């Protein structure tokens, strides 16, 4: 390898400014301890990539942290003495009186046993009552929907009634209508005679009627 | 294991399964700093340099048994490190869908974001100037200027003739000086 001086001399010829002593110092920082720890971290990664430790949890944690490996089997919590031995005997007595949440029994690997729910009689009644309520609510909702569908529009309902039937109905109410006559101007069969008009206005003084007619300049006429 | 163990001795020890890990750890200790700084100057960011250095040594671990000693070990290591850096930059460019110029300005921004950055100090200006260089010139300049690598060895690392490398270094030094004088 060439000496630093040779390289600096070469550089003085090309770019004198770069040939200054001390300029070749790289100003970047490296985290403290990086080079001390790097070989161990690298070897650990190489071992991991070889697939040695992932298959064996004991060896893996031993390699990562011997401290944690040593703590692995130390139990922090204590169960009461004889707890697991007496646990089995307690279960049948509790079955018919209270709701028992499924639990994990390390002494038994029976899945069906772990998944089984035991319920007391009052609890069953409450569940059936709740189910009945839900069914009732659904029934009411269905009835309401179907009932509203049967109410038909009144105009639509008249399409099935014949003209003659309609005329008979109106005659019963003293409204005279002849089937087949559809002109709106002639649908009102109540005719007013001069006498009817005279009777209609007889209580109103002539002076008032004349003032009313004057107020309608374009519909001037005479009052009989 | 003595600190002065030669590369040849380390390679012999590496080939023995019983001493393999120990020999490799010695190789890492011997070359880690030089390779780290070579990578760091290329990538600027410490985390990127750390990841890349690990990748370099993993490649070395996998290939060292087949190393034929045609070249010196350190030349071979520099070659792997340089290729790994260029691959890293290429991947970064692809991931970010940015042009080379944008990537270079990104590296310059990283330099400026350094907590110790001082635009008035010549060594920081030099780092910014290096990032303005084309990739090949940058590598050549850094291997020669910082790592003092002879052109003959550099030609093994970069698979380029010594003459072309000299020309590259000349251009790079001129550009850097211009940058420093004008900024």
Image (cartoon, grey):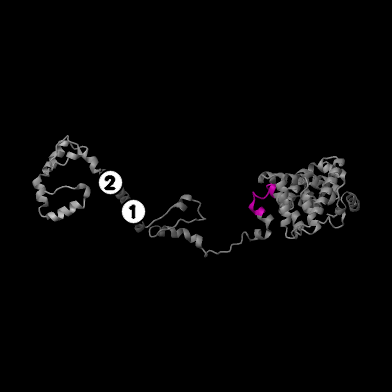
Magenta region: which residues? Answer: A48-60
The one nearer the camera, A167 or A189, is A189
User: Label 1 lies in what chain?
Assistant: A
Q: Is residue B10 visible?
A: no
Badge 1 marks a residue whose secondary structure is helix
Q: Is residue A16 visible?
A: yes
Give residue A155's position: percent from left, percent from top: 23, 42
Q: Vertical placement of A38 versus B92: above or below? A: below
The residue sitting at 48% across, 61% down in the picture is A86
Q: Residues within 10 Å of mark 2 (few under 14, many from 20)?
A: few
Give residue B136's position: percent from left, percent from top: 79, 44
Q: Residues within 10 Å of mark 1 (few under 14, many from 20)?
A: few
Q: In the drawing, what numbered circle is on residue A66? A: none
User: Label 2 lies in what chain?
Assistant: A
The residue sitting at 82% across, 53% down in the picture is B181
Give residue B22's position: percent from left, percent from top: 78, 52
Determine if the magenta segment contains residue B142.
no
Q: Vertical placement of B31 versus A84: above or below? A: above
The one nearer the camera, A176 or B137, is A176
Give residue A181's position: percent from left, percent from top: 17, 35
Mark 1 / mark 2, whichever is N-terminal: 1
The residue sitting at 14% across, 48% down in the picture is A222
Q: Vertical placement of A158 versus B149: above or below? A: above
Q: Is residue A176 left or right of residue A70?
A: left
- Report the Cα–Cα distance between label 1 and label 2: 31 Å
Q: Which residue is mark 1?
A: A128
Q: Which residue is mark 2?
A: A148
- Can you tell which quarter of the image residue A194 is in? top left
From the viewer's perspective, is the residue at label 1 or at label 2 nearer? 2
Q: Is residue B169 left or right of residue A176?
A: right
């Amino acid at each position: 390898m060439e000496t630093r001086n040779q390289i600096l001399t070469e550089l003085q010829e090309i770019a004198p400014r770069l040939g200054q002593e001390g300029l070749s110092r790289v100003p970047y920082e490296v985290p403290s301890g990086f080079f001390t720890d790097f070989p161990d971290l690298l070897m650990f990664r190489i071992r991991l990539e070889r697939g040695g430790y992932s298959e064996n949890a004991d060896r893996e944690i031993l390699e990562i942290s011997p401290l944690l490996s040593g703590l692995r089997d130390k139990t922090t919590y204590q169960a009461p003495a004889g707890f697991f031995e007496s646990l089995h005997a307690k279960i049948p007595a509790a079955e018919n009186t209270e709701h028992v949440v499924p639990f994990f029994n390390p002494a038994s690997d029976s899945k069906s046993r772990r998944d089984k729910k035991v319920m007391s009689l009052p609890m069953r009644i409450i569940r059936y009552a709740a189910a009945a309520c839900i069914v009732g609510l659904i029934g009411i909702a269905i009835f309401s929907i179907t009932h509203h569908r049967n109410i038909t529009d009144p105009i639509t309902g008249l399409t099935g009634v014949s003209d003659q039937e309609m005329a008979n109905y109106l005659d019963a109410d003293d409204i005279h209508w002849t089937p087949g006559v559809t002109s709106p101007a002639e649908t009102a069969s109540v005719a007013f005679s001069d006498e009817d008009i005279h009777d209609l206005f007889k209580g109103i003084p002539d002076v008032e009627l004349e003032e009313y007619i004057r107020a309608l300049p374009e519909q001037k006429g005479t009052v009989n | 294991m003595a600190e002065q163990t030669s590369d040849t001795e380390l390679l012999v020890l590496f080939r023995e399964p019983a001493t393999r890990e120990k020999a490799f750890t010695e190789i890492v200790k011997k070359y880690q700093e030089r390779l780290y700084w070579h990578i760091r100057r290329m990538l600027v960011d410490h985390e990127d340099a750390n990841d890349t250095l690990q990748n370099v040594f993993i490649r070395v671990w996998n290939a060292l048994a087949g190393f034929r000693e045609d070249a010196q070990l350190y030349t071979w290591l520099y070659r792997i490190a340089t290729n790994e850096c260029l691959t890293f930059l290429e991947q970064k460019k692809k991931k970010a869908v940015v042009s080379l110029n944008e990537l270079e300005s990104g590296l310059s921004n990283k330099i400026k974001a350094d907590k110790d950055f001082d635009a008035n100090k010549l060594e920081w200006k030099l780092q910014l100037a290096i990032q303005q260089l084309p990739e090949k010139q940058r590598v050549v300049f850094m291997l020669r200027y910082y790592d003092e690598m002879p052109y003959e060895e550099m030609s093994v690392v970069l698979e380029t003739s010594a003459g072309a490398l000299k020309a590259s270094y000349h251009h790079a030094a001129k550009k850097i000086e211009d940058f420093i004088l004008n900024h």
